[in-house]
Image (cartoon, grey):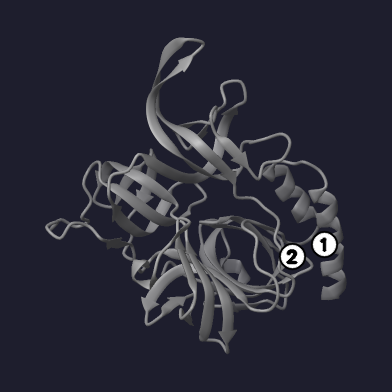
Amino acid sequence: MNNIATSHRRSTCLRTVLSHGATWLVLLFLLISCGGGFLLAGGGIGGTGIISLGPITAFGSIFVNGVEYELDGATILADGEPIDESGLRRGMVVRVEGEVKGDSTGTARAVAYSSTLSGPVGAQTPDSFTVLGQEIGITATTRFHDFPADRVETPPLRIDDHVSISSVPNPDGSFSASAVIYRPPADQVKLNGFIVAFDPAMQTFRINTFVIDISQASLENFGPNGPADGDFVRVEGQLVDSRVVEGQLEVLPPTLLAMQVKNLQQTLAGEGERMAIEGIVEALDDWTISLLTPEGRYLVSFNETTRFEDGTPADLAQGVRIEINGTIFDNVFEADRIEVENGD
C-alpha cells in the first residue's frame, strides 16, 4: 500500500466531510468510510516538536508518557490559571507542548491541566463515588491530593467535599479517576461528558442522568445547528434546584445551570507535529480508532506498519487503555506506535 497516496486520499475525503455539518455519529461513519483517521479535539501548535497528553507519573521535572520533561521557562496552567510547578500533582492528565531529545527526555514550553469534573462529592462506596451525578471509579492507581491532614480514612473522601478530578471517560459514560484533588468549597462546577437527550425547546440536555440547562450559556465551537446528541462537551456553571419559566417558579431535579458550554470536537492543526496520547478505546473499525481522552474524542489512523508494544492489533477493543505515538500529516494523526496498557 502506498502510504503517501493513501494519506492524500484520506485528507481529500476528510476535507469533503468537514465541509458538511454532521453530528459526530455521522462524521465517525463518514471518516471511517474515508479509510483513515482524524482528530477531534483541541488544536495543536505549529512547527516541529511534540504534543503529549497523559498523566503525570513521576517528578524530577515531570514524566508524561515515558518522557521526562524539563520545566525551566515553561508556562504552566491549571484550569486556565497560571501556577508554578509545585501546583502539579501525580495522576493529573496534562497536555505538554515542547520538544523531545531522543526517546526519554524533553523540554516543555507549555503544560496545561484541565480538570475533567469539579464539584461536591455525592454518594460514596469503597471503590467509587459520584460528582454531579457521574460515577467515578477508584482504582489501584488513583491518587488523592491535598485533603485535610486529619483525614485517616481511605479514601479520604467525605460527602460534600469539593474536589477536582482528572480522568479519562469510559465508553459507558463513567469515569476512572487518575487524580482526585481536594479544593475549597466553590460555587462554580465543571463537567465533561457526552450529550444525550438534547431538547432544543427546553434548552436542556443530560450528561448521563445529570440535567444541564444551557438557556443562559455561551456556546463555543458548535456549528450552525448547535449542540447535538453525542457531542463531547465541557460545561461550566452553577448548581440550581429551580428556575423561573414565563414568570412561574419551576422546581428542578439537581441541575447544572451552564454559563459556558464548549464543544471539544475541533479540527487538528500542526503539520509534522509529533503526538503522544494516552486514552481509552471507544470504538474500532478496520484501521481507525476512536480514542477517548480528557480533551475529547480522537480519531486516529494506523496501518500494517504501525509498531505494537505489549500487545497486538487483536488486543484493541472497547475499554482498553492505550498510548499512541504518531505524526500529524496533512491534518491526519497517523499512528506509528501503539502501546497496550493492559490495565496498568
**Rendered location of residue 188, percent (x, y):** 39, 41
Q: Earlier in the sequence, mark 2 or mark 1?
A: 1
Q: Nearer the viewer, residue 325 or 190?
A: 190
Q: Residue at x 76, y 62 (%)?
A: 36
Residue 344 visible at all: yes
Report helix, strand or loop for mark 1.
helix
Disc on res. 11: 1
Disc on res. 331: none
Discs 2, 1 touching: Cβ within 8 Å: yes
> Is the residue marked by circle 2 packed among few (<14), some (14-19), or many (20+) residues within 10 Å?
many
Residue located farthest toward the bottom when viewing the structure as drawn: 102
Q: Residue at x 38, y 45 (%)?
A: 135
> Is the residue marked by circle 1 packed among few (<14), some (14-19), or many (20+) residues within 10 Å?
many
Q: Nearer the viewer, residue 291 or 307?
A: 291
Quarter of the picture containing the C terminus is bottom left
Disc on res. 332: 2
Q: Residue at x 37, y 68 (%)?
A: 88
Residue 1 visible at all: no
